[in-house]
Image (cartoon, helix red, strand yellow):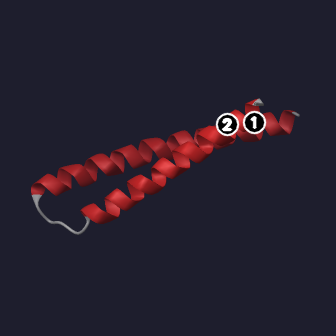
Amino acid sequence: MTLIDTLEYFIDDVGQHLECLAWEIQEETNYDDEGHQERFDDFCEQYDEHKARLDDLEKIKSIIESQQ
C-alpha cells in the first residue's frame, strides 16, 4: 500500500464519519429539550474537529502528489 493509498483510506474514513455526524446533527434538530441541545453541541464540536482533520489530510495528500 502506498502512502497515497493510506491517506485516501483515512480521507474516506473521516469523510464517512462526517456523514454520520451530519446525520446525528440533523436528528438532534428535531428535539427542543436541554438534553438534546447538549448532544447537538457535542455532535457539532465533533463535526468541526473531523472536518478540520479531513481538510488537513487532503492538504497532505495534495502536497505529496505535487512532489511526485
Which type of secondary structure does the marked residue at label 2 adopt? helix
Residue 26: x and y in percent read 33, 65
Write down the quadrant of residue 59 in the picture: top right
Q: Amino acid at mark 1?
A: Ile
Which type of secondary structure does the marked residue at label 1 adopt? helix
Quadrant position of the N terminus in the picture: top right
Direction from residue 65 to residue 23 in the image, left or right:
left
For label 2, the crowd category at 10 Å Cα-Cα, with few meaning under 14, some 14 to 19 and many 20 or more, is: some
**Residue at 39% over, 53% down:** 21
Q: Amino acid at mark 2?
A: Leu
Pick out the residue farthest to the front: 1
Marks 2 and 1 sit apart, C-alpha to C-alpha, by 5 Å
Badges 2 and 1: C-beta atoms under 8 Å apart?
yes
Direction from residue 61 to residue 57 in the image, left or right:
left
Above or below 33: residue 60 = above
**Residue at 73% over, 37% down:** 5
| Residue receiving disc 2 | 7
Pick out the residue farthest to the bottom: 30
Residue 51: x and y in percent read 50, 47
Residue 13: x and y in percent read 55, 44
Direction from residue 51 to residue 36 in the image, left or right:
left
Q: Identify the mark at residue 65; answer none if there is no mark.
A: none
Q: Nearer the viewer, residue 14 or 51?
A: 14
Above or below 25: residue 65 = above
Quadrant position of the C terminus in the picture: top right
| Residue receiving disc 1 | 4
Above or below 55: residue 24 = below
